[in-house]
Amino acid sequence: ANIIRIPQQFAYFEEYQRRVAQILGEAETERLVEEALGSSITLGGNDYVNNYYLLPVSVRSVQFTVPDYTEYIVSEYEKYLRQLYDLGGRRVLVTSTGPLGCAPGVKATRSRNGECTAELQRAASLFNSQLRSLINRLNGEASAQVFTFADSYSMNMGIFSNPAAYGFVDSTNACCGQGANNGVGLCTAASNVCSNRDTHLYWDNYHPFERANKIIVDQFFEGSSSIMSPLNLRQMMKFED
């Protein structure tokens, strides 16, 4: 209920620039914004999990096939990225969706054997592929490395597939929840809670623990071009050449 939607965030960003311009002038404000440390934007995951696949038959699934829905989402994403560029954004981190089919909440309702749900994994892969292509195209149009694509799908799958390598024991079940994979419903005072949260990848039905997120962020900063393209965060922020 308290989510600030993207158009409103952009409106606040415009208002910020107007106020700063009253103090510094338009030219200095433009320079300040373009040389800022950057912006981060993550969209797409909820469009699949909470809109397309939440119900056995959803409005979106009646309107669109998965490929058509993916094209629709990416086209909307493009509008936001272009608007952010027009507002002066020049160092923008764009993260892919994670492995949607592996979240405990998805497996609890859509998996028959406890494994990652193939249909949502395919949808995530299709979306991420088109998003990466969009980033490459926008950077080509700008003749600059404005947008950086972070392949958080691959980063998360690396942890999920080999949790022991990262100090986790359980990458399948949520720490807090109920039902299959502890992934049914919200985490409440009445839920089952794991005895050692440091051993679990997921806190609740959809959200990884802070320690897992830190591992991902470290890869944002140091990752190779296979997962951070065209630049990792350290390079994008010009901490090093």
Image (tube, rainbow, N blue to C red):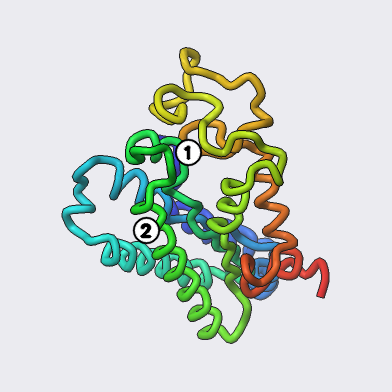
| Type of the residue with mark 2 | Ala
| Inter-mark Cα distance, 2 to 1 | 17 Å
Residue 83, position in %: x, y? 46, 69
| Type of the residue with mark 1 | Tyr
Q: Is residue 182 left or right of residue 118?
A: right
Circle 1 sits in a helix, a strand or a loop, which is it?
loop
Nearest the viewer among 81 and 17 is: 81
Q: Which residue is mark 2?
A: 123
198 lies above or below 71: above
Looking at the rendered structure, the number of numbered marks drawn on it comes to 2
Q: Is residue 61 left or right of residue 144?
A: left
Residue 145, position in %: x, y? 63, 78
Residue 43 sits in quarter: bottom left
- Residue 18 visible in the snapshot: no
Residue 206: mark in rendering:
1
Nearest the viewer among 110 and 1 is: 110
